[in-house]
Amino acid sequence: MDLKLEVIVLPVSDADRAKAFYEAAGFRLDVDQTFSDDYRLVHLTPPGSGCSIMFGKGMTAAAPGSTQGLYLIVSDVEEARAQLVGRGIEVSEVFHDAEGVLYHGHEAGTVTHDVPGQGRLSGRHPEAATYSSYASFSDPDGNGWVLQEITERFPGR
């Protein structure tokens, strides 16, 4: 049986502000519907993605900005970063992890290092290793995103 991740609910404080941000970032608006005074659904999809995001009014009790570590996979992290910056999105500089492991730690727009032995180094991975170069950004509420460059998938993917 396939189990397909298709949507992630994001906690936001202002649906219109979040909608404007994600549309500026290039996400496609799929649905914006108000069902009642207490329930509004906004659904958007990142370019090329099979998974979407949803937010609105009455969608979740989670605190706005509490969703972290959302990964957007790109084939060229520098190009993806430049495109987002060109759309007015504030994005960190490109970085890689000192130990070459999956990067952890993104908190309200500021990349943190709360994993022992992990350190952020400026620029792409020096050997251009797949899965190893990143940039990060946050939406207006602080929900945290990571761009991860993948040029070749590990076996079995």
Image (tube, rainbow, N blue to C red):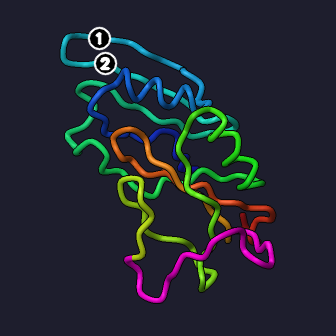
* Side of 128 relative to 81 (left or right): right
Q: Which residue type carries mark 1?
A: Phe
Q: SS of the residue at dot 1?
A: strand
Q: Is residue 31 magenta?
A: no
The residue at the point 36 percent across, 31 percent down is 55
Q: SS of the residue at dot 2?
A: strand
Q: Main secondary structure of the magenta part?
A: loop
The residue at the point 36 percent across, 53 percent down is 108
> Which segment did they paint magenta?
114-130
Residue bearing mark 2:
40
Residue sticking out furthest to the bottom: 117
Q: Quadrant of residue 62?
A: top left
* Side of 93 relative to 48 (left or right): left
Marks 2 and 1 close (CB-CB < 8 Å): yes
The one of 10 and 5 positioned closer to us in this rendering: 10
> Image height check: is 21 above or below 148?
above
Q: Which residue type carries mark 2?
A: Arg
The residue at the point 68 percent across, 69 percent down is 123
Q: Categorize mark 2 by other alpha carbons within 10 Å: few (<14), some (14-19), many (20+).
A: some
Q: Is residue 123 magenta?
A: yes
Residue 35's disc is 1
Q: Categorize mark 1 by other alpha carbons within 10 Å: few (<14), some (14-19), many (20+).
A: few
Q: The C terminus appears in which quarter of the rendering? A: bottom right
